[in-house]
């Protein structure tokens, strides 16, 4: 694909969507069902890593895998409707496509859940790849030839760098600009509303 029509990867949670209300509701439902106390406000303050990593803080190690399965099973019931698109999310995807490029979502979230979120919110990337976190995101980024990866977490920056893609950080998630910069972000934006203009400039210079 020509350089002026780049393939751009996006993280999902706290990059394209604010899933905190939905994830909080799902953890509260899981807590009620299992009888295990979970501080759902704390959970949603540190979104990014796989759900198994978070569940390990609340459940015995030998129960994490089965609990994660149950979390994903009840997720559509509790988490899709309360979640909303972050400012500029649709426009960021469409900006890539308007240049003739491909916009892909690469997320640690369970892929069917990610697709439900995007369909519900009317965000239409060209591909969605789930269950990849941090450096493992490079697998999908390399496979799809991504030139750029956009995310809110230092794990996203690490994934971009592992794929030799330009790392664009947005400060809409748990990591501030300094954390993203220290992790190796090449570009830092406050949110996705500034992404289309930045992308146009990037494409013109490519």
Image (cartoon, grey):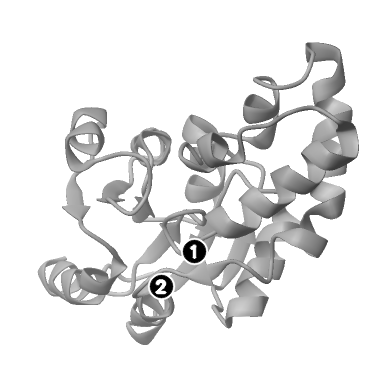
Asked if the residue at tag 2 contacts the one at tag 1, i.e. Cβ–Cβ closer than 8 Å, the answer is yes
Quadrant including the N terminus: bottom left
Task: Decide: few, some or many residues near mark 1? Use Cα within 10 Å; few <14, some 14-19, many ≥20.
Answer: many
Q: Which mark is residue 155?
A: none
Query: Label 1: which residue?
Result: 17
* Rendering coords of residue 183 (x, y %): 26, 30
* Rendering coords of residue 82 (x, y %): 62, 68
Residue at the spot 87% in from the left edge and 50% down from the top edge:
73
Would you say 7 lies left or right of 40 here?
left
The residue nearer to you, when weighing 5 against 83, is: 83
Vertical position of residue 115 compared to residue 46: above or below: below
Give SS at disc 1: strand
Looking at the rendered structure, the number of numbered marks drawn on it comes to 2
Give SS at disc 2: helix
Would you say 198 lies left or right of 136 here?
left
Task: Decide: few, some or many residues near mark 2? Use Cα within 10 Å; few <14, some 14-19, many ≥20.
Answer: many
Residue at the spot 53% in from the left edge and 43% down from the top edge:
44
Comes first in the chain, label 1 or label 2: 1
Q: Residue furthest bottom?
A: 98
Vertical position of residue 5 compared to residue 35: above or below: below
Vertical position of residue 24 compared to residue 77: above or below: above
Vertical position of residue 118 compared to residue 28: above or below: below
* Rendering coords of residue 31 (x, y %): 78, 37
Q: What is the C-alpha distance between the residues marked 1 and 2? A: 7 Å
Quadrant including the C terminus: bottom left
* Rendering coords of residue 108 (x, y %): 60, 43
Query: Label 2: which residue?
Result: 89
Residue at the spot 51% in from the left edge and 54% down from the top edge:
13
Quarter of the image holding residue 153? Answer: top left
């Amino acid at each position: 694909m020509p350089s002026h029509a780049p393939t751009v990867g996006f993280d999902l949670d706290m990059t394209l969507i604010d899933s905190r209300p939905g994830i909080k509701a799902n953890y509260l439902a899981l807590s009620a069902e299992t009888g295990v106390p979970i501080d759902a406000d704390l959970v949603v303050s540190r979104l990014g890593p796989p759900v198994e990593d978070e569940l390990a803080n609340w459940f015995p190690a030998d129960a994490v895998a089965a609990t994660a399965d149950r979390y994903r099973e009840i997720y559509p019931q509790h988490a899709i409707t309360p979640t909303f698109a972050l400012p500029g999310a649709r426009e960021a995807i469409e900006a890539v496509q308007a240049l003739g490029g491909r916009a892909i979502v690469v997320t640690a979230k369970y892929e069917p859940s990610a697709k439900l979120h995007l369909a519900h919110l009317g965000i239409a990337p060209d591909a969605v790849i789930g269950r990849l976190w941090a450096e493992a995101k490079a697998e999908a980024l390399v496979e799809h030839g991504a030139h750029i990866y956009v995310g809110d977490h230092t794990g996203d920056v690490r994934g971009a760098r592992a794929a030799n893609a330009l790392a664009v950080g947005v400060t809409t998630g748990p990591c501030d600009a300094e954390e993203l910069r220290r992790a190796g972000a090449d570009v830092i934006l406050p949110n996705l509303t500034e992404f289309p203009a930045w992308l146009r400039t990037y494409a013109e210079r490519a």
